[in-house]
Image (spheres, grey):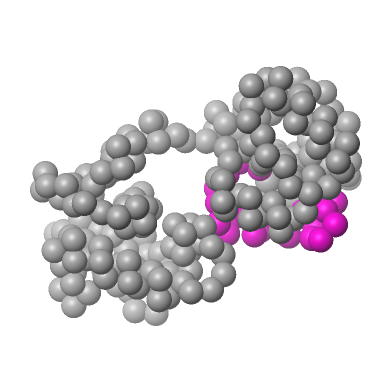
Amino acid sequence: MLIIEDDATIRTALVRSLSARSHSTMTSPTALDGLQSLIDHRPDVVLLDLGLPDLDGRALLAMIRAVSDVPVIVISARDDGPVIVSALDAGADDYLVKPFAADQLEARIRAVLRRTPTAEQAGPVVVGRLVIDSRARTAALNGTELGLSPKEFDLLLYLARRAGEVIGKRELFAKVWNQPYGGADRTVDVHLHWLRRKLGETAEAPVYLHRVRGVGVKLVPPP
């Protein structure tokens, strides 16, 4: 669990309370440090204060949503309606006004985790003769394992979970590489080329991976 909170006293109290309830925690005192921790460690839940010293928490929410679907619970002393609504609209899953009881926070954490699908719940993803097992991190075509690199697997899984949708390269770069800025086109193009080769197809003769010029790419079953 990642706590993004600039007040050292509150951070310490949250860590103590959550650790006593068997949660593993990490903390960040600023927005940008918190974003980097999110990218590096992929926590299950983020607790986010809005009054951060380097960036408004709602702006950070938008940045988080560009790279992750992690549940975010805002913890803030601001209790005015428009702020709460704007935080939820920016991507927060819940909003808790300070001060709050530890049991109340624990209940909110349980609630957002119940709403978050797990790999075990999702099961294998099947597109045509392509079967992708997120738990075993294997992908097979016509019963033969493809032997993908970690990023090739992540890219294929993301496309397969959204089969039939055209997805832009910037979204792929943000979601698969957890990097919101820069390098999207080249990085994604190279990995798509490698992925096509392992699927036994090319950009000029697509079977599963179809390019939509100027928009992105989509994964579809063969006709």
The one of 136 and 68 positioned closer to us in this rendering: 136
Which residue shows up at 30% across the image and 67% down it? Answer: 192
State the image coordinates of residue 72 (x, y, percent, origin top left): 66, 42
Which residue shows up at 86% across the image and 41% down it? Answer: 8
State the image coordinates of residue 188 (x, y, percent, origin top left): 38, 69
Q: In the rendered view, does 141 fall on the left or right side of 61?
A: left
Which residue shows up at 88% across the image and 31% down it? Answer: 99
The quarter in which the N terminus is drawn is top right
Q: Is residue 68 magenta?
A: yes
Q: Quadrant of residue 58?
A: bottom right
Q: Is residue 189 magenta?
A: no
The one of 91 and 120 positioned closer to us in this rendering: 120
Q: Vertical placement of 48 versus 168: above or below? A: above
Q: Quadrant of residue 30?
A: bottom right
Q: Is residue 99 visible?
A: yes
The one of 34 and 219 positioned closer to us in this rendering: 34
State the image coordinates of residue 222 (x, y, percent, origin top left): 16, 59
Q: In the rendered view, does 18 fall on the left or right side of 217?
A: right
Q: Vertical placement of 204 versus 162: above or below? A: below
Q: Is residue 89 visible?
A: no
